Structure formats: structure tokens, C-alpha cells
Image (tube, coloured by chain):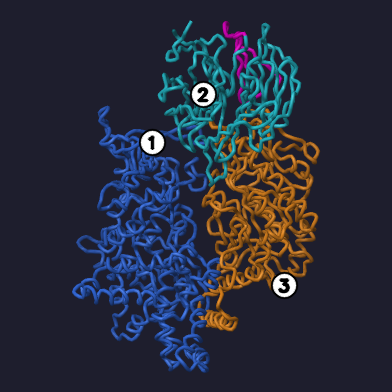
Chain colours: A cyan, B blue, C orange
């Protein structure tokens, strides 16, 4: 049943005792997993709202992704990746892997679910088999922290996004040869200030359109600009569209709906929002303000619902988190 | 307060009050003050303090040879009425108000000439301090006649926290910065609430650049409340604008949709119907605002003595009281009674014996600096250094001579009027300013520091020793005093002229002898100029030149 | 002497006393010169405020602990943040204080107070004070040189010689470049320079007969410093270092400034400060600390190794501190804000007991739990480690001022 991106309704809101920063629905849509500023993974049974805590990680769980028919992969700040088998009553740990010696802030799964890629804060990118967590190859040694990864549906290309100062960069690589096919510099998402010599901005997330023809990178336009998502053409590297919010903060996550429109989740110091966009117009279709900054979003496999994580607190310091499920209306 | 029906002067003029109070304080502390300064000491100091530059040899000769008993008060009045007074005060108050700060994008700054022009005009007209402050705080850059007054905001990017801190520091002499985070545990009377009370006046401001007009403005929103949370206590407070010790000023209720004269947008700065900034401009410059009058008194004192009665100038609080509270109170009271007459106040301070004291130590002992019992040895400020280097090497006179010659040729009818017109002088100085910017660059401290922190450091000295810019000044080139000196074959006359030019006094015997020795083998004008050059340079490097004393 | 009793006098104190160190007026520099190794000070200043939780005092797995792990160190039972792996291997050579409470969550005030060892304005900062207190006759190089990159915020330079005057002001070296104007201008002959300098000295000598000594002498010193810097400008020349060494220290400004600092200490400059800029991580604290710690870790260990190998560490006190710590609470941009209540610093080298961790914060790292240390205590400790009697007074310009805050005292547990 087609849904309207402009109309959504809050179904259920779960409070969590730490600020949240990642979430994903399981492949069968039965569970919603979320991670945040501790080592626990929250698991909600979507239908019943039943909440379970999954133990296994050693630090903050920053990234999550679905893989194939059964698995959800989660990664943490120590570089550990866990595969949760979500085919049963409750997700069960299938394998746990010390994938990197340092923080993993980028995780992507291939279209067929058989391969996944990880990127760490030292710039390493590795390719793995989803089924058993075996490393296939050490892929790229980049000098800058990897903050976004995607495996192209053609199975031949991998896309990385980093946080290099002044010109955060997207690179499209040929997997088999390891050669760079395309490089897109995104100075618009740089918040570099020479005074501190730190890149305040950078690309905070990367995702592909379902057919792989567009690359979406998110972050903040400049040092104090609005939350922004830039859409590039994967083949030419040409800027296709700029989705610019009015919220002064970061866009932390963008996801493409199967019907072609885009959802973004953004946050500033003490509030947030999510928005729906079409990829061919500048104005968003709808926006919803939230109490805390929106830190992540995921679309349910049935494409009728989506989940948002938030960090909640007094002033600028979040104490707790919220995990909410919304439903699109017809 | 003065007695009923009597003006303050009839009670006792301020300078006499100050001297009386100081004498009492010295006696209580068993301090012997220094003797009265010599005429030369006094005249150099007075020129530096009131005109920002050492005097010319001609002026010095005239003063030293003057016979009138009242030559000191006359000199004070003369210097206060010269165009150079207004130009000097503009430079001094540029540093006080803008503190050498620049906006984040330097090219967005208010033009220096316009800003100092505004200040110079204000001081030339002896505008009362409350009027100046009101204009500065009220300006958003749009009023054509006072557009440059917006510099106070622009130099700080109209950033509310920076403004809050500097409004308190510059106009009230207190630093509330630490209160930004919590009730300052050190200074009981600096309350976090005071900080946020001032913050509420400026929190709606923002920097606005009009790219079409190529000008910078201050924009203001009509909404935005200030709440603050103490890091340590769990209490949270909401505050309307309020000056320390004053009452909260609630916003009037505005009809929805009618809050703006011009609503803020990407192309408009935002002008609210009710402006909290204008409230600040109205409330701050009043005798009722605690610290406002005291701060001015203290800063004027520091201008004349190189150190405040409260020191550092922006750190008045219970644990850092004035060194001479009664003196500061008397100045404060005088300022209120005389409607913040800056020129008049400086005149009174210059008339005190305390100001006119010698820099020579009383009985060889060095009294504490905050006793003001001997004229302080203070490094020339970057601006005083610049102009004094130019004066000592004859560049200022030469510059005006040149333009005057030109004027005589082209517009002889205007000569008379121009000579009295201070803006003509101002334009003349602007040319020299451009030529001597390297001196300022070498001597200026960091943004945010005041002129009481300009002690000589090795970088300055390296500049004076080795910079090509200094070489230009000490070269025996035509149109400089070297022309005059080279022509003097009598070493006594030569020594007198050199010392009057550089140290603004006549030489003592051994100084004349030193020059005579140097000149023994120099028989031609060219040889004399060459022999003299290193000596002149050496004198410019000496402590007697480097300091105001 | 305010602090020590006769019974507790250490050998160093006894020497200091015999040499007349009890008051600054009596601080006979000639006596100090008999010491075989002149003591020196190196301050590595982590400007902006490093997070104690990501460095010396990790609390992994706790509410405010952040995402990083703690790692084992060369010191049994002591763990530090995973971002400092090299430093972890030399912990047995350091003394770390985990219980600093400066209560100054503010850059400007913090920069001054931490370096001056008190809140009262007008005092010299550590480098200037030590330059004065360790002064020896015949010293020509500036007593204190401070190194940083260009362009940071003004507060980085806060603090100066205070009432000690211009002579002890830190000479600023920006971007590793020697000060401007170190070369005598062309076209001036030596005889003219001699006449110039003689004329200046004669004028100053006459002026001194009747006027206050300290400003005139202070100004005079800047000429001695200028001439020393001109003569020895090669000490600023990093081209003299091998590319391998450049690499070892790191090509970033902190690495290069630390290499320069080593050269300056070798050349005999008594006090050197290197500013590591900027640690003020109000956003993305963890990314920020990852970058800064990586720079610091490698450079710091390289520098300490070099100082040790060259036999310099035994007479050089190395102080690693910022102007404050960072809030345990993590804000919504993933940043940590200003915090002065419970943070850490480290020391090594001259006069410092090796392998000590002093003080403790509570489980969440929000308060000091044991052995609280104030800014005055740290200042006393630095001076004591350098063999200076921290209970002495300055006698200058008719005023007596304590060298260190009399209400505080040295931390005995970290002193050798």
C-alpha cells in the first residue's frame, strides 16, 4: 500500500536510560534494535513493545545494519562487531569479532547481505563475510577517520566518506582492483576552523539510493550552518540536490524510502527534527520537531514505518534516550 | 556632596581635594612623596598624556624659557584645546573601547578612520561620557551621523557573551566572566545573576553584513529569553535585562505580528519595535548605575598615571578595592556634578601636585607603585611610541610643513582657516599613520589587553635595533632635523637642540661633552650628520625616551 | 622558613639554605652556579583544557566515562586512556595527579591562575617565576621562551612576568620561527653600532642615578636578550635536525615545537613552554581527543626519551597541564565543556618521584575523593622539584611578595 511521506503518526515511544545514537529494524521486521552511550543494545519487539537488553558489546554502540534474511550487525567504539541472529524469539549472538583495534564509526552491508564493510577511526576499511565474520580483505588505508560506508548494489563498488579537514571526501572504489574510480570533495560540509585546527563538521553519514544511482551524505553546512544532506550522482559525481534544513545543527542520518523519497534525522544542542524530502525539490515535504536531537533513523523492511532515536536531557546535557516508532499514513 | 548652594569649586577644587587626600594617605603610610617635577619633566609628561606625543624642540624651548608663574596651568589649557588632544583621546578610547579587537572577518570591520573620526569629533566637542556611551550602545550602524559608533559591537562580532563581559569590563570596571559558569566563588559580589542580567540586554543581538551596502550592522530580534543554570547549584533562574544593582526591565507586551519595524531575514538585519539594546543605552550611562562613574574616574586617572586607583582597570571587586578610595570617590563625585566633563576632569588631575611630581626618587627609595608617591615610570604606549619616534625625528613637523607649503601655493586664502581646523590636522596625521603602521604592529599587545600592559619586551627592542623601518627614521636624510644639526658647528648649541628634540630637556654638562667629543673630527656638515646619526639612534633606544616618567 | 622543620630538611633544602636561597633578595645566583647541572623547566601546556577522562583518569563503562577503553600501563594496577598507548608504556617514569581541583572553568582565568599558582592578579607565571628564581650571572639567553603555533585564541598567551618586569617575560616564538629582526640591518658599520650602543648605555646610566631602577634595568635586559638571540639564532634552526628526527617528533606544530624546545633547553634556556593547541572540545570530544592525543602521545614520549638519553631529564622538570579539565557530562554535540573541579595533570624528571599516581576522583569522576590538590599546591611542587624554596619571598620595588601562595604547600607524595 503506498504511503504519504508527509503524514506520519507516532506509534510508540520507548524511554531508555542512556542517550541513544543508532537503530535498525531486524530483517523480518519483528525487532527494533538500538544502541547508545553504553555497551547495551536495546531490543524492542515491535508488535508487543516488549523490551530486552542484549549484552555483548564493550563500549558505545554507534552503528547498526541489517544483513540478509536473519542478521543484524552492530559495531562499537572499541572496534568490536557483533552479528545478532534475529530469526528467533529474541536476537541471539551468532558471532563476535574484534574487527578493528579502534572505534568503528562506519558499517555497511551489501545488497545481498553476504558481505559487509567496516571503517575505523584510523582510516582502515575492511571487508567481511556476514555469515561467519571472516575477513575477506583489508581494503583501504585512508589517513582520515571513516564516517560513512556503502556497498553498491552492483556488487563492484564500495563508497567511503571521511572527515578530512576542510574537504571531507567521498570516494568510490572498484572493489576488485582497489582503485579509486571517483573522488568527490564536499567542502560544504566542512566546519573546519583554523583557530582550533579541528574539523568540527565533516560527513557524519553516507547512504545510497536503493538503485545505487545516488549518494547521500549528511552533516552540517559550515561551522554553524543548518543540518544538510547533499545528494550526488554515483557515476558522474555531480551534485544532484542539496537538502537544507532550517535547524542549525547536524543531520546525523538519512535513509531512502523504496518509493524514492528521503528521510533525514537531525539535531542541535537541545532539540531535533526529522524531515521527509523528495530528491528533486529543495523544500522538505514535512518536518516534525522533537524534544531532543534526533541521532539516527531506520525504515522498517515493510516500508510503512520508521524508527527514530533521540538523546534527551536538560539543557545541552542528555541523560536519557528515546526510541520511537512512527507509521506513515496513506 | 557639596554643601547646599555651593558649587564643588567653592567648597574646594578637585585638584586641591586630591592633593589633600593623597597627603593624608602618604602620611598615614609614612611615605615621603617625591619633589615637584622640573618644568622639563612636567612638560614632556603633559604632552604625552594629553596629546599622545612628545613636544617639539620649539615648543619645549618656549615653555622652559617662559617666565609666567602660571605657565603650568596655561600649558595644560593649551594642550587641552589643541586638535591633537581630540586625536589623542580618540586613539586612547579606541583602545579602551575596542581593545584592538577585530571581527572574525577582518574586512567587515568598521573603517578605522571613520571610528576614530567619530571619537575625535566627540572629544573635540568635549562630549560628556554618558552621551558618548549612550551613542555607542544605541548604535546599530544605521544612523548616518554616528554609524561608526557601532564599532564596539562589530569588533566583538556582536557576540552576546563577549559583549556581556566587555560591557561590564569597559563601562563598569568589573569582570563578570567567570560568573558565566556559576556564582564566582572568588568574588562574592560578582553574581551569576548580574552576568545574565547584562546578557539579557544583548542576547538578541547578532552581527549582520549587508553585502549590497558593503557595511556591517547589528541586528536584533524581538524575542528570546535568558535562563541560566548554575553548574553547582541546581537552581535555575530566568532574568529580564538588569544592570548590577538595578531593577529588571520587563519587555512591554507587543501585539503578535507587530514586533518588528523590520523583521530579521537573510537580507535584513532585524529592527524590533522594542529594543533591549536601546534600553541598555538608556540605563547604563547614568550616575545611578553602580560603577559607571567610578569606572570613568579610574580610567582617566590611569590615563594620567599609567595605573588605576583600582588596578587592573577592569577588576573592581571587594577583594581588590581602590588604593585611595577617597580620591576615587572625589573624582567620581566631581564627574557626576560636572556632567562627565572629561576634559575638565583631566585638567583637574593635571593640576594636582600629585601629577606634577618628579620622577626622581624621594631620598633614593622606591615607594610602592600604588602609593603614587613618585611619578611612575611607564612604557610609552604603542601609539605614543609611534608619534614620539616621528616627532623626535622631525617627521611630524616636516609633514605639516610640506602640506602647508603646498596649500600656500594652491589655496593661499584657506591657510589661515586650515591652521585652526582640527580635521585638517587629522587628515595630515592619517598620512603619517599609514607610513608608520610597522611601529604599531611591533609594539601592540594582544587583542583584549589594555594600555597599562605594554611593558617593553625583547621583540620591541629587536625592532628598535634592527628593523629597516627604524633605519629609515634615523637616517640623516634631507628634510629631517639632521639638516639643522649638520649645519650647527657649535657643539653646545647642537647638544641643546638634539636633547630638546629627543629628551625634551636641555643637556647636562657631560652630555654636551659627549657630543662635543663625537664632533671633534667631524668638520663638514656631512661628516657631522654621519657622526651624529648613531648617537641619535642610541638616545632613541634609551630608557629616558622609551618611558613616560 | 614556613614549611619545613629542621628535622625534615632534605639534602637539597640544606644546600639551598647554605647557598642563601631563603629569600629572593639573598638568592645569590653565583651560589647556584656551583650546582653541577643547572635545573630547567619544560611546560607542555594543553591549552583549551584536555579531558581527564580521555587521558590520565579514565572511567570506562561508567555514566560519563565515554566510549574509550582504559589500557594497562607500565605501572602495575594503573590504567590510562587508550588514546595514549605510548605514554602508557612510560608511566613508571611519570607522576600523575588525578585530584586537581582548581575550580576555574574558564580559559582566561585558568591560564593565568594555573600558571601563576594563585588567583591574585599581577604575579609572574611559572616560566617567568622560575626564570627569575634560577637566574645565574652570565646568563644571556632569555630566561623563558614560549612556543606555539600562530592564530590561536588570545587566552593562550595570558599571563606574563607580572611584577618581575619585562626581563622575565616569555619570549614568544610563533610557528617555530625565530623572533623578527634578528639580523643587523645592512649598511651599518660596526663602529656606528658601537657608538649607538655606547650612547644608549651612557644615557641609561645617567638616568639611573635618579630614577627607579627596575623598569630601566628591565628595559636594559631586553637589549642583552636581543643581542643573545641575535648571536645564537641558530638554535631556532630546525633544519639542523635530521628528517628522521623531524618525523619522530611529528610534523604537526606540537611535534616541531617540542623538538625546538629540546634544542632551546640544550642551548641553556632555563624555562621553555610549548603550547599544544587546542583541546577545547565542546563538540565531538571523542574525535577531537583522538586527534590531539595521537599528536601528544607520540611527541611526548619521543621528547621524554630524548631528554633522558641526553642526560637532561635529571635536571629538567617536565610539567604537563592545561588550564582546566573537561566536564564529566557529555553534551548533545558529543562534547565535554569547561570543568575545574576534578581533573588531572602529570609531571616527570627533575625532583619528581617516578611511577606515582596521586589522588583519586570518585567513581563517576565528578569530584575529588582523595588527596585534593589546588593550584597553589602544584606551584609549590614545581618549585620544590626544581630545588627552589617555595616558602621564600620576592623583595622587589619595596614590596614583599611570597614566591608561592603561603596558604598552599608542595605535594610531598610526588617529590623525589
Residue C30 disc label = 3
Dots 3 and 1 on the same chain? no
**Badge 1 element:** strand
Compared to residue B143, the image places residue A31 above or below, namely above
Q: Which residues are magenta?
A: A28-56
**Badge 2 element:** strand
Splitting the image into 4 quarters, where does residue A168 fall? Answer: top right
Percent coordinates x, y for residue A178 in the rendering: 69, 30
Percent coordinates x, y for residue C13 in the rendering: 75, 61
Disc nearest the viewer among 2 and 1:
2
Residue B239 disc label = 1
**Does residue B535 show up magenta in the picture?**
no
Task: Estimate how packed mark 3 is, as few (under 14), some (14 to 19) or many (20 or more) residues with alpha carbons within 10 Å.
Answer: few
| Labelled pair 2, 1 in contact (Cβ < 8 Å) | no
Residue situated in front as seen by the camera: B138 or A264: A264
Give the side of residue A231 with respect to residue B505, left or right.
Answer: right
Give the side of residue C205 with respect to residue B386, left or right.
Answer: right
Q: Residue at x 71, y 69 (%)?
A: C20
Q: Is residue B33 visible?
A: yes
Residue A81 disc label = none
| Labelled pair 3, 2 in contact (Cβ < 8 Å) | no
- The residue indicated by pointer 2 is A294
C-alpha separation, residue under disc 3 versus residue under disc 2: 67 Å
Compared to residue A145, the image places residue B504 above or below, namely below
Amino acid at each position: 500500500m503506498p504511503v504519504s511521506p508527509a503524514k506520519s503518526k507516532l506509534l510508540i515511544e520507548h524511554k531508555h536510560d542512556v542517550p541513544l545514537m543508532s537503530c535498525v529494524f531486524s530483517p523480518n521486521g519483528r525487532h527494533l534494535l538500538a544502541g547508545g552511550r553504553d555497551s547495551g543494545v536495546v531490543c524492542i519487539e515491535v508488535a508487543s513493545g516488549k523490551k530486552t537488553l542484549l549484552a555483548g558489546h564493550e563500549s558505545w554502540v554507534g552503528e547498526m545494519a541489517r544483513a540478509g534474511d536473519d542478521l543484524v550487525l552492530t559495531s562499537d567504539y572499541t572496534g568490536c562487531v557483533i552479528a545478532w541472529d534475529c530469526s528467533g524469539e529474541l536476537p541471539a549472538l551468532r558471532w563476535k569479532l574484534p574487527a578493528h583495534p579502534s572505534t568503528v564509526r562506519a558499517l555497511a552491508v551489501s545488497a545481498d547481505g553476504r558481505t559487509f564493510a567496516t571503517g575505523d577511526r584510523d582510516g582502515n576499511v575492511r571487508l567481511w563475510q556476514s555469515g561467519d565474520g571472516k575477513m575477506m580483505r583489508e581494503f583501504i588505508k585512508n589517513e582520515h577517520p571513516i564516517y560513512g560506508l556503502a556497498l553498491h548494489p552492483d556488487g563492484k563498488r564500495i563508497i567511503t566518506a571521511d572527515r578530512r579537514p576542510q574537504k571531507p571526501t567521498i570516494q568510490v572504489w572498484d572493489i576488485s582492483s582497489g582503485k579509486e574510480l571517483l573522488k568527490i570533495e564536499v567542502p560544504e560540509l566542512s566546519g573546519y576552523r583554523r583557530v582550533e585546527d579541528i574539523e568540527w563538521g565533516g560527513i557524519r553519514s553516507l547512504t545510497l539510493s536503493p538503485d545505487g544511482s545516488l549518494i547521500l551524505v549528511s552533516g552540517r553546512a559550515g561551522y554553524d550552518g543548518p543540518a544538510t544532506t547533499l545528494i550526488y550522482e554515483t557515476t558522474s559525481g555531480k551534485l544532484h540536490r542539496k537538502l537544507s534544513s532550517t535547524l542549525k545543527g547536524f543531520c546525523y542520518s538519512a535513509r531512502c524510502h523504496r518509493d524514492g523519497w528521503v528521510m533525514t534525522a537531525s539535531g542541535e544542542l537541545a532539540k531535533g527534527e526529522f524531515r521527509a524530502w523528495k530528491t528533486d525539490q529543495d523544500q522538505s515535504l514535512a518536518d516534525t520537531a522533537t524534544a531532543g536531537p534526533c541521532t539516527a533513523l531506520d525504515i522498517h523492511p515493510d516500508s510503512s514505518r520508521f524508527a527514530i532515536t533521540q538523546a534527551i536531557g536538560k539543557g545541552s546535557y542528555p541523560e536519557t534516550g528515546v526510541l520511537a516508532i512512527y507509521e506513515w499514513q496513506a | 556632596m557639596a554643601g547646599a548652594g555651593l558649587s564643588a569649586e567653592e567648597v574646594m577644587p578637585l585638584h586641591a581635594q586630591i592633593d589633600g587626600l593623597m597627603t593624608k594617605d602618604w602620611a598615614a603610610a609614612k611615605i615621603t612623596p617625591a619633589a615637584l617635577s622640573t618644568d622639563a619633566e612636567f612638560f614632556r609628561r603633559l604632552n604625552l598624556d594629553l596629546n599622545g606625543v612628545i613636544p617639539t624642540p620649539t615648543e619645549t624651548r618656549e615653555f622652559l624659557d617662559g617666565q609666567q608663574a602660571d605657565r603650568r596651568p596655561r600649558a595644560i589649557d593649551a594642550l587641552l584645546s589643541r586638535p591633537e588632544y581630540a586625536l589623542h583621546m580618540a586613539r586612547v578610547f579606541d583602545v579602551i573601547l575596542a581593545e584592538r579587537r577585530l571581527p572574525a572577518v577582518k574586512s567587515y570591520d568598521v573603517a578605522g578612520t571613520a571610528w576614530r573620526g567619530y571619537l575625535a569629533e566627540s572629544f573635540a566637542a568635549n562630549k560628556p561620557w554618558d552621551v558618548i556611551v549612550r551613542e555607542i550602545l544605541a548604535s546599530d550602524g544605521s544612523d548616518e551621523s554616528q554609524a561608526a559608533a557601532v564599532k564596539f559591537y562589530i569588533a566583538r562580532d556582536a557576540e552576546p557573551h563577549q559583549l556581556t563581559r566587555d560591557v561590564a569590563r569597559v563601562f563598569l570596571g568589573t569582570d563578570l566572566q567567570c560568573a558565566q559558569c556559576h556564582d564566582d566563588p572568588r568574588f562574592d559580589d560578582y553574581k551569576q545573576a548580574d552576568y545574565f542580567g547584562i546578557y539579557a540586554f544583548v542576547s538578541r543581538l547578532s552581527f549582520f553584513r549587508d553585502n549590497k551596502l558593503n557595511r556591517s550592522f547589528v541586528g536584533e530580534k524581538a524575542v528570546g529569553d535568558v535562563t541560566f543554570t548554575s553548574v553547582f547549584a541546581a537552581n535555575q533562574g530566568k532574568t529580564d535585562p538588569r544592570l548590577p544593582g538595578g531593577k529588571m526591565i520587563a519587555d512591554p507586551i507587543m501585539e503578535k505580528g507587530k514586533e518588528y519595524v523590520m523583521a530579521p531575514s537573510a537580507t535584513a538585519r532585524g529592527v524590533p519595535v522594542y529594543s533591549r539594546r536601546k534600553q541598555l543605552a538608556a540605563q547604563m550611562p547614568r550616575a545611578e548605575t553602580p560603577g559607571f562613574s567610578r569606572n570613568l574616574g579610574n580610567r582617566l586617572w590611569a590615563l594620567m598615571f599609567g595605573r588605576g586607583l583600582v588596578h587592573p582597570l577592569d577588576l573592581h571587586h571587594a577583594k581588590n578595592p581602590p588604593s585611595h578610595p577617597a580620591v576615587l570617590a572625589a573624582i567620581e563625585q566631581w564627574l557626576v556634578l560636572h556632567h562627565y566633563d572629561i576634559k575638565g576632569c583631566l585638567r583637574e588631575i593635571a593640576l594636582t601636585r600629585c601629577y606634577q611630581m618628579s620622577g626622581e626618587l624621594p631620598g633614593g627609595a622606591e615607594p610602592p607603585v600604588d602609593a603614587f608617591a613618585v611619578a611612575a615610570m611607564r612604557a610609552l604606549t604603542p601609539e605614543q611610541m609611534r608619534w614620539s619616534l616621528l616627532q623626535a625625528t622631525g617627521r611630524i613637523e616636516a609633514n605639516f610643513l610640506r602640506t602647508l607649503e603646498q596649500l600656500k601655493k594652491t589655496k593661499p586664502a584657506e591657510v589661515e582657516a586650515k591652521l585652526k581646523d582640527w580635521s585638517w590636522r587629522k587628515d595630515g596625521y592619517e598620512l603619517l599613520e599609514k607610513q608608520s603602521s610597522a611601529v604599531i604592529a611591533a609594539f601592540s599587545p594582544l587583542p583584549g589587553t589594555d594600555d597599562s600592559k605594554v611593558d617593553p619586551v625583547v621583540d620591541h627592542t629587536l625592532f628598535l635595533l634592527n628593523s629597516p623601518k627604524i633605519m629609515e627614521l634615523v637616517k640623516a636624510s634631507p628634510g629631517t632635523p639632521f639638516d639643522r644639526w649638520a649645519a650647527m658647528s657649535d657643539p653646545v648649541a647642537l647638544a641643546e637642540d638634539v636633547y630638546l628634540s629627543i629628551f625634551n630637556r636641555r643637556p647636562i654638562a657631560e652630555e654636551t661633552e659627549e657630543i662635543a667629543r663625537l664632533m671633534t673630527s667631524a668638520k663638514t656638515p656631512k661628516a657631522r650628520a654621519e657622526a651624529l646619526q648613531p648617537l641619535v639612534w642610541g638616545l632613541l633606544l634609551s630608557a629616558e625616551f622609551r618611558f613616560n616618567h | 622558613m614556613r614549611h619545613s622543620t629542621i628535622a625534615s630538611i632534605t639534602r637539597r633544602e640544606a644546600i639551598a639554605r647554605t647557598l642563601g636561597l631563603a629569600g629572593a633578595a639573598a638568592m645569590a645566583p653565583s651560589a647556584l652556579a656551583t650546582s653541577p647541572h643547572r635545573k630547567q623547566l619544560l611546560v607542555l601546556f594543553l591549552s583549551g583544557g584536555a579531558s581527564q577522562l580521555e587521558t590520565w583518569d579514565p572511567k570506562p563503562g561508567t555514566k560519563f566515562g565515554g566510549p574509550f577503553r582504559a589500557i594497562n600501563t607500565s605501572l602495575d594496577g594503573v590504567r590510562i586512556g587508550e588514546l595514549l598507548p605510548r605514554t602508557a608504556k612510560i608511566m613508571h617514569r611519570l607522576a600523575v595527579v588525578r585530584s586537581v581541583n582548581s575550580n576555574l572553568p574558564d580559559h582566561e582565568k585558568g591560564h593565568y591562575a594555573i600558571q601563576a599558582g594563585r588567583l591574585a592578579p599581577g604575579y609572574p607565571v611559572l616560566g617567568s617565576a622560575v626564570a627569575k628564581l634560577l637566574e645565574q650571572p652570565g646568563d644571556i639567553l632569555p630566561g623563558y621562551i614560549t612556543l606555539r603555533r600562530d592564530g590561536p585564541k588570545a587566552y593562550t598567551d595570558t599571563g606574563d612576568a607580572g611584577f618581575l618586569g619585562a626581563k622575565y617575560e616569555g619570549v614568544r616564538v610563533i610557528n617555530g620561527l625565530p623572533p623578527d629582526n634578528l639580523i643587523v640591518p645592512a649598511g651599518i658599520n660596526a663602529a656606528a653600532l658601537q657608538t649607538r650602543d655606547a650612547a644608549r648605555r651612557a644615557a641609561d646610566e645617567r638616568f639611573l642615578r635618579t630614577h627607579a631602577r627596575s623598569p630601566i634595568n628591565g628595559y636594559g635586559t631586553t637589549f642583552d636578550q636581543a643581542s643573545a638571540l641575535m648571536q645564537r639564532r641558530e638554535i631556532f634552526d630546525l633544519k639542523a635536525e635530521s628528517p628522521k628526527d623531524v618525523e619522530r617528533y611529528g610534523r604537526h606544530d606540537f611535534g616541531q615545537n617540542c623538538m625546538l624546545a629540546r634544542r632551546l633547553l640544550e642551548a641553556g634556556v632555563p624555562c621553555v613552554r610549548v603550547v599544544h593547541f587546542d583541546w577545547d572540545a565542546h563538540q565531538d570530544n571523542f574525535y577531537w581527543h583522538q586527534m590531539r592525543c595521537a599528536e601528544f602521545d607520540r611527541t611526548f614520549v619521543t621528547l621524554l626519551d630524548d631528554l633522558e638519553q641526553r642526560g637532561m631529564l635529571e635536571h629538567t622538570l617536565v610539567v604537563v597541564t592545561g588550564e582546566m579539565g573537561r566536564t564529566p557530562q557529555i553534551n548533545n554535540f558529543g562534547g565535554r565543556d569547561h570543568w575545574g573541579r576534578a581533573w588531572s595533570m602529570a609531571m616527570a624528571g627533575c625532583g619528581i618521584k617516578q611511577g606515582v599516581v596521586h589522588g583519586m576522583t570518585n567513581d563517576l569522576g565528578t569530584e575529588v575523593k582523595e588527596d585534593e590538590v589546588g593550584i597553589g599546591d602544584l606551584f609549590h611542587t614545581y618549585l620544590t622539584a626544581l630545588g627552589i624554596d617555595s616558602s621564600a619571598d620576592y623583595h622587589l620595588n619595596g614590596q614583599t611578595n611570597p614566591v608561592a601562595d603561603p596558604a598552599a604547600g608542595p605535594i610531598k607524595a610526588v617529590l623525589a
